[in-house]
Image: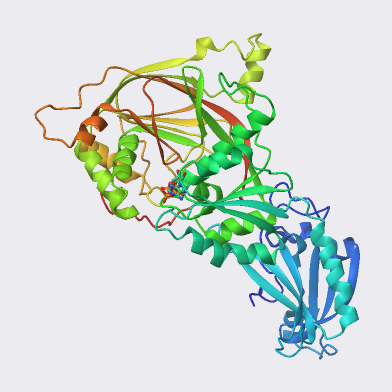
Amino acid sequence: MLRGRRGSRVRALEGGPEEEAPPAAAAVPLALLPSAQQPEATAEQMLLRGIFEIGRGSCDVVLTERALRWRPILPERPAGDPKFDLLHKEEFIELKDVFSVKLKRRCSSKQQSGTLLGITLFICLKKEQNKLKDSTIDLINLSEDHCDLWFRQFKKILAGFSNRPKSLKIFLNPQSHKKEATQIYYEKVEPLLKLAGIKTDVTITEYEGHALSLLKECELQGFDGVVCVGGDGSASEVAHALLLRAQKNAGVETDCLLTPVRAQLPLGVIPAGSTNVLAHSLHGVPHVVTATLHIIMGHIQPVDVCTFSTMGKLLRFGFSAMFGFGGRTLALAEKHRWMSPNQRRDFAVIKALAKLKPEDCEISFLPFKSSQDLQERKAQGSPKSDCSDQWQMIQGQFLNVSIMAIPCLCSVAPRGLAPNTRLNNGSMALIIVRNTSRPEFIKHLKRYASVKNQFSFPFVETYTVEEVKVQRKNNTSGHNPEEKNEPYEIALDNSFPWNVDGDLMEVASDVHVRLHPRLISLYGGGTEEMNDSKVTCNCL
Ligand SMILES: Nc1ncnc2c1ncn2[C@@H]1O[C@H](COP(=O)(O)OP(=O)(O)OP(=O)(O)O)[C@@H](O)[C@H]1O
C-alpha cells in the first residue's frame, strides 16, 4: 500500500477543471497550498467519525465533505517526548482522488464471501513527470454495521462526481504498433475500468476506416464517452468520426464548414500505437495507466481541432499536419509496413533525407488575433469578418511545412514538434523550413531532440495563425530522369503527400486549414514541462 509520509497528505492527483463534487473541491493539490489556505477539518462539515486500523495502528478517522483525515490514537502525552508530535500528526486524502470503494473480505474458498475485514479505498496518485498511478488504502474494522455505514457514505460521495463516466464505447485497433493493443487493453485498462464500476462496450476494428463507418450509425445513447485504444491514426479517425457525427446530428453542411458544432461525447485515447503524439500531448507522457486514470476520474480538456478542406469540400478533421519532408517520410514508411515500426520509421527518415527536395508552394495565412486584439479592432470600428487585409503570403521552396493545433509531443521531440502551441489556445503553429543544404536541415531536425531551440536557424520561420491556405506550384524539380528509381519512388517524387495525425492524405489541389477552438473534449489532465526526457530516435 502506498502511503504519504507522516504528517503529510497522501500525495494524490489534482482535480480536472470540470470536477464537480464534492462542492468545495480544490483545483490545486492541497499539500501544495500554504498552510493558511489548507482547509481546516473543523471548517468542513463532518460526515462520520470512527476508529479504523490504518497501517499498523488504530486511528481516529474523520470523513468530511472533501477529505478523509486520520490521526493515530496514542496514549497520554509523556512529559517532554519530542517524538509525540511527529507520531500524532494527521494524514489525509482528498475524496476527489478516490475512484472506487470496496468492502474488504478475507478470501475464503468455502464461504462465498469471506469474513469482513474493513473497507478498501482505491485512489489515484500523482507520480513524477505527469504520470498517475492507482493505489489503495485499507481501513480495517471488523464490525459489519460500522463498515456498512462508512461504505454507503463513500458510495454516495463517489456517485456525486457526475463528470466521471459510467459507460464507455471502446474502439480497439488490434493492428496498432506491434499488435499489442488487445493485450494492453485487457491487462491494464479493463481491470481499472471494472474496478471503477464503468460499463464498457468494446469493438475490435477489422480494417482501416472501420471505426469511422461504425460511428456514422451506431447507437451512442447511454454512453458517456468514447475511447480509442491504438495509435495516432486510430485516435484521429475516431475524433474525425465523432465530429462528422456531430455535424450530421446538428444538420450542419460539412462543405464550406465555417463554424462546426462541438463533438457531443468526450474522447479518451489509450496510447498503443507506433507514435502516440495525441496521448503524449494530452497527458505529457504516453502512459497507459495515466491515460486510463484520467478517463476514470473524468478529467476533461477541450482541445482545438483543424479542418482540412480542398475546393470548399471538407477532407477531414485533425490535430496536426505536415507536408514536404514530413509527408514524404510517412509515405515511404507506409510503403514498408512489413518492417517493424522502428525500422520503417528510421528507414523512411534516411530515405527521405537522401532524396530531400523542396516543394514549390505559395502559403497564405491569417495571423492569430487574440481576443484583446479583436476588442481593440472592434473599438476602432473594424469587425472581425473584415480580415481580408490581414492575410499574409509567402512564396518559395520549402523543405518542410508543419501546421499544428497541439504541441505534438513525441519520443523524438519530447518538448513537442510545436512547443509554443497549447492544446486549446485558439491558434495553430505554422512552421516553415525553407530550402537549405542537407547538413543544415539535419542540424535543424536534430535540435528537436535537444534542449536547444529548433527554430533558431535563418531558414526556419514560425508563425501563430488561425488559417492557412497551401497552393502547390508545378513541381518537377525533384525528379532526375537519369536516376534509377522504383516505380513507387517516381510516383512519390511527383505526389504531394500530407501527414495528418500520422495518416497519409494525398491531395491534388490546394488545401485550406482552419482552426476551430475547443471543438472536441478529450480525457486528460494538465501537463508539467518535460526537461529530462529520453529521446529514442537513433537514425540521425
Ligand atoms: N484491423 C485493422 N487492420 C488494419 N488497419 C486497421 C485496423 N483497424 C484500424 N486500422 C487502421 O490502422 C491505422 C493505423 O493504426 P494506429 O494509428 O492505431 O497504429 P499505428 O500505425 O501503429 O500507430 P501510429 O498511427 O501512431 O503510427 C489507422 O488509420 C486505422 O484506421
Residue 9 visible, this angle: no
At 70% from the left edge and 54% from the top edge, which residue is drawn? Answer: 167
Q: Position of residue 207 (x, y in %)?
A: 46, 46
Q: Where is residue 466 in the image (x, y as percent from the top left)?
A: 53, 25
Quadrant occupied by the N terminus: bottom right
Most foreground residue, 492 or 1: 492
Is 184 left or right of 17, judged from the image as shown? left
Q: Is residue 262 above or below residue 56?
A: above
Count of numbered circles on the image: 0
Is 190 left or right of 511, judged from the image as shown? right
Q: Residue furthest left?
A: 482
Q: Where is residue 520 in the image (x, y as percent from the top left)?
A: 62, 38
At 70% from the left edge and 69% from the top edge, which residue is drawn? Answer: 122
Residue 97 visible, this angle: yes
At 50% from the left edge and 50% from the top edge, which residue is drawn? Answer: 280
Most foreground residue, 508 or 275: 508
Q: In this view, does 46 lie above or below 103?
A: above
Q: Is residue 366 above or below residue 213?
A: above
